[in-house]
Image (spheres, rainbow, N blue to C red):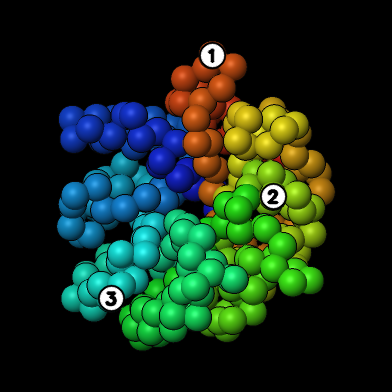
Amino acid sequence: MKLALQIYSLRQALAPEQIADTLAKTKAMGYDGIEWFGLMGKTPAALAQITRDAGLEFFSVHINIDDILACDTALMDEMAATGVKYLPIGWLPENRLAGGADFEATCTLIRGYAAEAARRGMLVLYHNHDFDLALYGDATKLDALYDALPGDLLGAELDTCWLYSGGVDAAEYVTKYADRAPVIHLKDCVKDGGRAGFKPVGSGVLDWDAILPCCGKAEWICVEQDDPSDGLDAFRCAEMSAAFLRAKLG
């Protein structure tokens, strides 16, 4: 497994004049790669170059429902040319989740977009939040989405904090979808869940002794902390998460 940072964690330090320094600091913390939450107004080639200039791998860029609706194959070509492997859908609105009026149409859209991505060597993933864990029949809305689309078209980018916050056992869910989860978001939080507060990995309530052994099939484990905590700045939180994981994983 390689260690990445979802750079959303440091979004306040990504102005054009800050990016190079922010990425250099991220590399110095011990991260191997960066997951971007969009193209930051740049071309894929330019963003890839900035990332690699810092000694970090450029492997994953989040997309959204507008990207899926547009299904811009020329942009996909540009993304693939940079070596991007994963295109995680950051979230879906309620009407597009299981039970929503547009769920079936959304599955059809994802199937078409993901097939185009797969032709270019990229895999679309779905990044869950707590609301995806709402019950739908005997399972969850997240289960229904993964059941509706095969793993070779829609992989999983499981987020441990949001699994916990959604009321399921994070280790069990990571194990359940291990074969379709090449990237796992490692995120910690307070007892009442992420809506009440986030923590550096290892500083919250999640059971990492149970979770980390379940991540062995992932190519990347990706730290994300939506907001800093305990009076620390975002850089210190990211540094603490990396130090904890490096010590745990060796």
Estimate the spatial distance between the alpha carbons at disc 2 and disc 1, rounded to whole Å.
26 Å
The residue wearing badge 3 is 71
Type of amino acid at the residue the image marks with label 1: Gly
Q: Is residue 92 left or right of residue 201?
A: left
Identify the disc placed on residue 31.
Answer: none
143 relative to 19, above or below: below
The residue wearing badge 2 is 166
Q: Earlier in the sequence, mark 2 or mark 3?
A: 3
Q: Earlier in the sequence, mark 2 or mark 1?
A: 2
Disc 1 vs disc 3: which is toward the camera? 3
- Residue at 75%, 49% in the rendered image: 167
In this view, the residue in front, 164 or 132, is 132
The residue wearing badge 1 is 231
Estimate the spatial distance between the alpha carbons at disc 1 and disc 3, rounded to whole Å.
42 Å
Residue 239: x percent and y percent?
53, 29
114 relative to 156, above or below: below
Residue 29: x percent and y percent?
48, 32
Taking the image as drawn, is residue 81 in sight? no
Q: Residues within 10 Å of mark 2 (few under 14, many from 20)?
A: many
67 relative to 26, above or below: below
